[in-house]
Image (cartoon, rainbow, N blue to C red):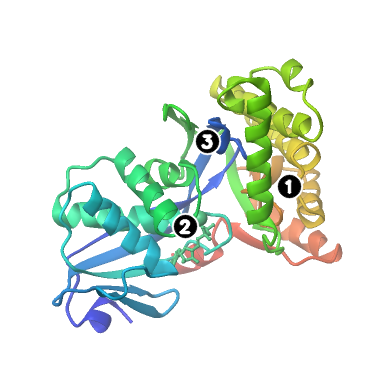
C-alpha cells in the first residue's frame, strides 16, 4: 500500500527522521546530566496530504493499521497518539493545523531501544513544518516532540531521544547537556564504526525499574542538598550516602564524568575504555543489566577489533552498543552472535542494518 492507495490521492510532501543509539551517558538525562547519542541509518518517513473531510487519518505501513481522529475519538492510543500528540502540541503553541492524511513508513526497529518513537514524532513535525511553512527550528521540533510523547503517548521521557533524532546524523555524535540544552556536534571516534546488537531479551522490568532508579536518584540529590545529581562532580560526596543510594549516585556522577572526558577529545581506544567502564557501572552500581546483556557485552569486549561495548538504553534487557574498527562490524557481529548462541541466547544485529544494505 502506498499513500495514493490508502488515501485516494497523491501526497503533498514528505520528511524523514532517524532513530538513535546512545554511546555514553546512560540514566543521566533525568539527573540533568550529559549524553552522547548518534543517529542510526534507519529512519522513519512521513508523507502528508490534506484530508478531504474534517478528520485526521493516520496510516502505518509497518503496522498495516489505519486510525481516524474524529470528535469522538480524540484520545487515540498506540501509534496514533504520537502523531496526534504532535498535531495537538502545535495547535497549543498557536499554529492552526488543518485535517491531515498521514502515511508512516519506517526502517527503525520498533520497541528495540533505538527510538522509533522519537523518529516518528520528529518526522511528523518536520513534514507538518514543511507543508505549512511553520517558522519553527530543529530545537523546537525536539521540544514539541518530547511534549507529544509525554502528554499524548504517556511516556515520561527526557529530551535526549528527540534532540538526537532532530539534530544528530550518522557521521557525528551529539554531546548534549540535558539541563541547559547546550550541545556540540563531534565527529565519530577515528577509524571506528558503531555496532548495535539486540540481546533478544525483552525489556520486561524496564518501566518499573526505571521509575525506581529515578526515585532513588531524586532521593540521593535531596539528601545531598542539590537540585540534581548533575550538580555533584566527585564521588567523595556520594560516598556519604546510605546504600543503595551511594552506588546509584556514584554511577550517575562517574557516568557524567565519562561523557565530559569525551568532550575533551579522546582516541577510539579511550572511548572504548569509557564504554567498558560505563557497562561495569551500570551492572554493579546501577544494577540495570541482566545476565544475557552481561554475556553479550563480555563477548564483544574480548573480540579483536572492538574498542569497547556496553548495554545501551534503560537496561533490563534490550540492546548493546559497541565501538568497533571501521569496516569490521559485520564480521565481529557474526563471530559474537555465534558464541552468544552457544551460551544459549539468540541475538540480532540492528546496526549496521542488514535490510538497508540489501535494499541498496
Ligand atoms: P522505541 O522508541 O525504543 O522504539 P517505544 O516504546 O518508545 O520504543 O516506541 C515504540 C512505539 O512507537 C510503538 O509501539 C508505536 O506505537 C510507535 N511507533 C514507532 N514507529 C512506528 C511506526 N513506523 N509505525 C507505527 N507506530 C510506530
Ligand atoms: Mg521511544
Residue occupying image coordinates x 70% and y 64%: 200
Query: Which quarter of the rendering shows the C terminus?
Result: bottom left
Q: Give the image location of residue 81, x and y in percent.
A: 39, 65
Mark 2 neighbour density, 10 Å: few (under 14) some (14–19) many (20 or more): few
Q: Give the image location of residue 118, x and y in percent.
A: 43, 53
Q: Earlier in the sequence, mark 3 or mark 2?
A: 2
Mark 3 neighbour density, 10 Å: few (under 14) some (14–19) many (20 or more): some
State the residue position of label 2.
Answer: 154
Residue 188 numbered mark, or none: 3
Look at the numbered disc 3 and say if its residue's Cβ is closer than 8 Å to ligand 1: no
On screen, residue 57 above or below 45: below
Numbered disc 2: secondary structure: loop
Q: Nearer the viewer, mark 3 or mark 2?
A: 2
Residue occupying image coordinates x 31% and y 56%: 86
Q: Give the image location of residue 121, x and y in percent.
A: 37, 56
Residue farthest right in this picture: 343
Q: Nearer the viewer, mark 2 or mark 1?
A: 2
Numbered disc 1: secondary structure: loop
Residue 288 numbered mark, or none: 1
On screen, residue 322 above or below 273: below
Of residues 30 and 171, the one nearer the viewer is 30
Q: Are marks 2 and 1 in contact (CB under 8 Å)?
A: no
Residue 311 numbered mark, or none: none
Horizontally, is 45 left or right of 236 in the view? left
Query: Which quarter of the rendering shows the N terminus?
Result: bottom left
Amino acid at each position: 500500500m502506498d499513500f495514493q492507495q490508502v488515501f485516494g490521492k497523491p501526497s503533498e510532501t514528505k520528511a524523514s527522521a532517524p532513530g538513535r543509539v546512545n554511546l555514553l551517558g546512560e540514566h543521566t538525562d533525568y539527573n540533568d546530566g550529559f549524553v552522547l547519542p548518534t543517529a542510526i541509518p534507519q529512519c522513519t518517513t512521513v508523507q502528508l496530504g490534506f484530508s478531504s473531510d474534517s478528520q485526521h487519518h493516520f496510516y502505518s505501513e509497518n503496522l498495516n493499521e489505519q486510525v481516524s481522529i474524529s470528535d469522538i475519538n480524540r484520545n487515540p492510543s498506540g501509534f496514533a497518539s504520537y502523531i496526534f500528540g504532535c498535531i495537538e502540541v502545535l495547535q497549543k503553541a498557536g499554529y492552526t493545523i488543518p485535517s491531515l492524511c498521514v502515511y508512516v513508513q519506517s526502517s527503525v526497529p520498533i520497541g528495540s531501544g533505538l527510538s522509533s518513537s522519537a523518529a516518528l514524532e520528529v518526522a511528523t513535525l518536520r513534514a507538518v513544518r514543511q507543508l505549512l511553512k511553520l517558522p519553527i527550528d530543529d530545537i523546537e521540533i525536539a521540544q514539541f516532540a518530547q511534549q507529544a510523547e509525554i502528554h499524548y503517548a504517556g511516556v515520561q521521557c527526557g529530551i535526549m531521544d528527540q534532540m538526537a533524532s532532530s539534530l544528530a546524523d550518522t557521521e557525528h555524535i551529539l554531546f548534549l547537556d540535558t539541563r541547559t540544552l547546550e550541545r556540540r556536534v563531534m565527529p565519530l571516534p577515528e577509524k571506528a564504526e558503531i555496532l548495535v546488537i539486540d540481546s533478544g531479551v525483552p525489556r520486561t522490568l524496564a518501566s518499573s525499574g526505571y521509575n525506581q532508579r529515578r526515585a532513588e536518584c531524586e532521593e540521593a540529590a535531596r539528601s545531598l542538598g542539590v537540585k540534581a545529581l548533575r550538580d555533584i562532580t566527585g564521588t567523595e560526596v556520594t560516598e556519604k550516602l546510605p546504600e543503595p543510594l551511594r552506588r546509584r549516585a556514584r554511577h550517575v556522577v562517574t557516568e557524567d564524568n565519562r561523557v565530559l572526558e569525551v568532550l575533551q577529545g579522546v582516541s577510539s581506544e579511550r572511548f572504548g575504555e569509557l564504554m567498558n567502564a560505563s557497562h561495569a557501572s551500570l551492572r554493579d552500581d546501577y544494577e540495570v543489566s541482566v545476565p544475557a546483556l552481561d554475556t553479550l557485552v563480555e563477548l564483544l569486549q574480548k573480540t579483536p577489533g572492538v574498542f569497547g561495548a556496553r548495554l545501551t538504553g534503560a537496561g533490563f534487557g534490550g540492546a548493546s552498543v559497541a565501538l568497533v574498527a571501521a569496516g569490521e562490524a559485520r564480521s565481529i557481529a557474526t563471530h559474537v552472535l555465534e558464541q552468544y548462541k552457544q551460551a544459549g541466547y539468540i541475538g540480532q544485529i540492528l546496526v549496521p542494518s542488514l535490510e538497508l544494505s540489501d535494499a541498496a
